[in-house]
Amino acid sequence: MSAAVSPPGAEARAVSETLLKKIHQACDAEQGCLSFDSYMNMALYHPGLGYYSNGLMPFGEQGDFVTAPESGALFGRCLARSIASVLEQVEAGCVLELGAGSGALARVVLQELHALDCLPRRYWILERSGAMRTLQQQALADLPPQLASRVAWLEALPTQPLRGVVFGNEVADALPVSRFRWQDGTVQLEGVAAEQNGLISCAREADPANAQRIRQLAADYGWEGVYVSEYCPGLPAWVGALAECIAAGALLLIDYGYGRAEYYHRQRAMGTLMCHYRHQAHADAFWFPGLQDITAFVDFTAIAEAACAAGMRLTGYTSQAQFLLGCGIDRLLAAADAGDTRAYLQLSNEAKRLMLPGEMGERFKVIVCSRHLERDVIGFAARDLRSRL
């Protein structure tokens, strides 16, 4: 971590120290070596202490990173057009947003769907964190009654399948991952062990099925020397559950990631795990647990496989830049008032951040899987990247 970054304050340190004690206890319960995915789950989601549960602001300029919705309204307005193309095809359609973050995206999407005369019957937000739910409720509190009355929060997926859209922006990357080390055919899983004032890595034996799968990846992609990476053990079941709750409509996920061949390319020998604190990216996942984001890129091939296994159809996969173009971001920019120099410059900068290859445009991907739709979902016609999966 850069010395220029201010260290956490006393209150935040106390939260991290309390969580660290619980992680130490979990390590002891696992014979001294806790699996990395279990550690990541505690660091991010432990009730009242994890990064997404402790009430410390993780979003925006005052937080640790800025997501697309915090950049402005362009992203949400484009996304709403894609969602509308599904709602137009289903009767009494609903929208379910996964992990709505600060609530900024829900606000813009609802407003734009209203402008398009395509409001959903319900706009559900699946949010397990009470702290995040409070933040979202504050962000949506002053919506007009005809919009606010459609919003409801869930702590679990609906028990009855819905007709409409289930979507998530930067959600899959926060699912806990397992870390592995491959060297000349030998596979070890990274674990987490307690030391007096913190945490260190330890090695765990890989179960035969995962060891064989990792060896197959090594053979497929020509790994040499030492290769460290990750996989998300919970991703297939998570996507499968989302797919099963859609009777008709679409599952749309936006995140940074790759198809499997790019994910496990021989040159990506250190994996994709990354941490964020105060807009600084670093690789120390043990630094003040509970106070930093821990994330990994998404294997979009795994998403497609799980959705198709649940009976959905892969109907689109493209870069964020091409998705936004397909949703009309160029027309939104053209319609803006160029005479308001300051506002137009801000809008232009927002578009650049969303679309330039060096920013979010190519690093982020968008995937959509559908069930019982007669027409394509808007946003995927400009550039079809499904062959990369």
Image (cartoon, rainbow, N blue to C red):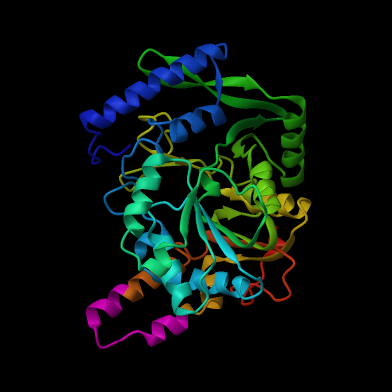
Q: Is residue 215 visible?
A: yes
* Residue 332 painted magenta: yes
Q: Is residue 131 left or right of residue 232?
A: left
Q: Which residues are magenta?
A: 330-346
How far across and how far down the image is residue 211, in percent?
73, 29
Residue 315 lies in quadrant: bottom right
Within the magenta stretch, is there residue 364?
no
**Residue 347, quarter of the rendered image:** bottom left
Question: Is 361 or 336 nearer to us in this picture?
Answer: 336
Residue drawn at point x = 44 percent, y = 31 percent: 43
Q: Residue at x 33, y 22 (%)?
A: 17
Residue 242 vertical position relative to residue 2 in the rendered view, above or below: below
Magenta span: helix, strand or loop, mainly? helix
Closer-to-camera residue (194/81): 81
Residue at screen point 56% across, 73% down: 84
Left or right side of 133 for 266: right
Q: Is residue 319 above or below residue 180?
A: below
